[in-house]
Image (cartoon, grey):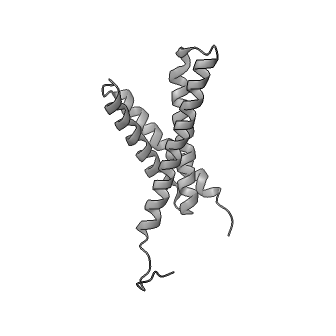
Amino acid sequence: MTDFTGSSPSPQRPSAVAILYGLIVSLCAALAGILVVASALSWTPLSERTLPYLTYTIHVISVVVGAGWSARLAGERGWYYGTVTGLGYALTVTLLALTSAEVAWSPAALIQGVLLVVIGTFGGVIGVNLRRPS
């Protein structure tokens, strides 16, 4: 397919769009998860001691959904799109945490970021295999 200039589109453009959509979907999923957990903490007898486990669960689900969405849009190389989406999510969450709270950099944050990237790779592999048959 060619655009109005007669040249074929760059292969980088669709990949960037797929990764951006995946990152947006993962951040929206995280926001929805945060709202559900905040509501549950406010209106139920759920203890705040469970908050770290719920936070990790929200991160995992968000990365899997976003990476899967990204790889499904791309239709190929699910591991690549999942990894980049997971990396983008990990960097975004880390930067938000470092700028908005009194959080110090720690090895645990690095390990969590690496795990999110690995989980994103897994989500991308799942997402590329969930694409619609053509």
Q: In this view of the protein, which residue sits in the foreground, 80 or 17?
A: 17
- In percent of width and height, residue 10 lies at 41, 73
The residue lying at 64 percent from left, 60 percent from top is 131
Q: Can see residue 80?
A: no
Left or right: 42, with 8 as reference point: right
Residue 87 in percent (x, y) is at 41, 46
Q: Is residue 6 above or below residue 72?
A: below
Is 94 above or below relative to 48? below
Residue 46 visible within the image:
yes
Residue lying at the far bottom of the rendered structure: 6
Give how far across and how far down residue 76 sits, in percent: 54, 63
Quadrant placement of the C terminus? bottom right
| Front in this rendered view, residue 95 or 63 | 95
Please provide percent x and percent y for residue 31. 52, 37
In the displayed structure, 62 sits above or below 39; it is below
Q: Residue at x 60, y 51 (%)?
A: 126
Residue occupying the point 60% across, 30% down: 36
Is residue 83 found left or right of 110 in the rendered image?
Answer: right
Q: Report whether 94 appears left or right of 63.
A: left
